[in-house]
Amino acid sequence: MLPENISKRNTGVPGALVVLMDIVKIQQTAVEEHQILHRDCSLNNAMILDELEGTSEGFLIDWEFAVRIATDHKYPIGGTGTVPFMSRGLLNQFVVLQQEADLESKKKQTKKKKETRGRNSVDKPKTPKSSSDSLALPVSYVIQGFADDLESLFSCSLGSASSLVVPTSGRRVLVDNMIHPVTFNTILAVLNSHLDKLPDDEELVSTVNMLKKDAVILTHRVKGKHIASDSPSVVAPKQQKSHHSDTESDSASGSDA
């Protein structure tokens, strides 16, 4: 899933960057080759596969809300994504729709009160509140594109090792995303530039393997296993009894003399 000029990196920050690049390429393939928009790039849908050789690969799952891209980029409000990972553009649209629903609800309540006051009827017992009284968003549409999914992907990366280096540049290219939608190539260029600045694979793998071995030894020692084999040999001190016996022998020799 990676571009030809990008080699796979191992675990840690390089691996996290490659995982993000994998997911970006998956979205790019879906959009450009199949005209499919995922619409829900949340943390639970961005998955990592750790392979036996020590590399990692990124996947994007749960395509149940995916849609074929429309010419006007308008889609039903349902399935637009998971709120904590939504783009700012989608959240702004939700706010506007909520405000419109609130305003419409207030108008209906005001009209209902006026109609009630105009009647000269006997007071009737109040009916219990039902679900129909609850405020809900009307059936609406939002404008959504792949740039919204890319912004959601960077929201997911904030909890990963890649957040150590990526988010600053990521937020910089996404700051005007609502006005000037970011492109796949721009995001890939940002990730690739950070990947090039990281240490060489061999040096990183050597350090990681050394830390893993130290962690295993430490774990065994804490659990009380293999202490004899892992601990350095200690020379036992001479026993006091032996020293006392030597003293008595010297005294006896002096008496004989």
Image: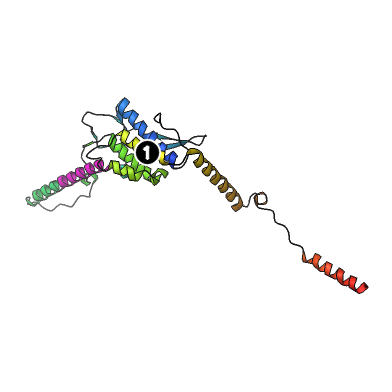
Looking at the picture, how far across and down is residue 196, in whole percent? 41, 38
- Residue shown at 60%/49% (left/top)? 220
Residue 87 forms part of the magenta stretch? yes
Q: Is residue 63 visible?
A: no
Looking at the picture, how far across and down is residue 30, in whole percent? 33, 29
Q: Which SS does the magenta portion mostly show?
A: helix
Q: Left or right: 116 with respect to 13?
A: left
Specify the farthest residue to the bottom: 255
Specify the farthest residue to the top: 33
Q: Left or right: 139 with respect to 242?
A: left
Q: Is mark 1 on a helix, strand or loop?
A: helix
Q: Which residue position is annotated with label 1?
A: 193
- Residue shown at 37%/34% (left/top)? 23
Residue 194 forms part of the magenta stretch? no
Which quarter of the figure has residue 160? top left
Q: Left or right: 147 with respect to 157?
A: left
Which quarter of the figure has residue 63? top left
Give the extent of the magenta segment. 86-105
Answer above or below: position of 232 versus 169: below
Q: Looking at the image, which is closer to me, 60 or 249? A: 249
What amino acid is labelled 1 in the image?
Ser
Q: Looking at the image, which is closer to me, 232 or 112? A: 232
Answer above or below: position of 221 versus 2: below
